[in-house]
Image (spheres, rainbow, N blue to C red):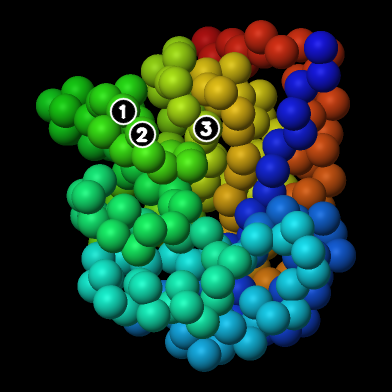
Amino acid sequence: MNTPRTRIKICGLTREEDVEAAVAAGADAVGFVMYEASPRYVSVDRAAELANRLPPFVTPVLLFVNESAPKVIAACARIPTALLQFHGDESPEACLQAGRPFMRAARIPLDDTPQSDKASFDLVKYAQDFKAAQAILLDAHVEGYGGGGKTFNWSLLPPSVSAHLVLSGGLTPANVTDGILQVRPRCKTLAVDVSSGVEISKGIKSFEKINQFVAAVRAADEQFAKNPNYVRVPAT
């Protein structure tokens, strides 16, 4: 049986040349940050300019953090092909207000998180609560919003999550293959989302790193096809 390839999103784009590099490398989606506190923020007008450069079948994604429904709806009107990504404290009801397909970010505890806080987060329940989402995006739980380029412990995720997942948080060309192989057996399908891991500086992407990242994802797909039940054995 053929297994689906891992979809790729390059996030935090701010320049035309970075959009073109992501498309040329084979990205399935590109992300524009609508959160003004982010160093990768772009206005709706700027996001629309960049999205207009996308060819068919490459999806623009608009990332919001606790934004009002009227502003989300207005952004959707400017970029009608966009998928939404909610990265703040939005409720299931708030995510539905724009009437558009969306992803919901889940903030996964880091290893240094107190055990009581780790135990309080239930990804299986979270996915059920946001069952209307196209996918649940997994990012590290750090101060503020966004993963801060941090990687969480993939091996501690539940063994089975009835959802499409997007792995994010500290991914790089060096670690994305292992991340895919560890997380993909745990969900319906898996995609990956990278931002800082392919940057020269915040909001400025490296063409070389983008190409290396895509190549590493494809290498993971080849390995997974050979061993779909891959689980890395932790070092002792």
Q: Which residue is mark 1?
A: 128
Give the amino acid at mark 2.
Lys
Q: Residue at x 23, y 30 (%)?
A: 121
Q: Residue at x 75, y 50 (%)?
A: 213
Q: Which residue is mark 2?
A: 131
Q: Are marks 2 and 1 in contact (CB under 8 Å)?
A: yes
Q: Residue at x 24, y 72 (%)?
A: 68
Which callout, 3 or 2, points to the residue nearer the camera? 2
Name the secondary structure under disc 2: loop
Name the secondary structure under disc 1: helix
Q: Quadrant of residue 57?
A: bottom right
Give the amino acid at mark 1.
Gln
Give the amino acid at mark 3.
His
The picture places residue 25, in percent across and down from the top left corner, at 84, 59
The picture places residue 78, in percent across and down from the top left corner, at 51, 82
Q: Name the residue nearer the viewer: 32 or 93.
A: 93
The picture places residue 82, in percent across and down from the top left corner, at 55, 65
Which numbered tag is attached to residue 164?
3
Q: Residue furthest bottom?
A: 45
Can the viewer see residue 209 in this picture? Answer: no
Q: Are marks 3 and 2 in contact (CB under 8 Å)?
A: no
Note whether 55 is above or below 140 in the view shown: below
The picture places residue 219, in percent across and down from the top left corner, at 83, 34
Q: Earlier in the sequence, mark 3 or mark 1?
A: 1
Name the secondary structure under disc 3: loop
Note whether 97 is above or below 1 in the view shown: below
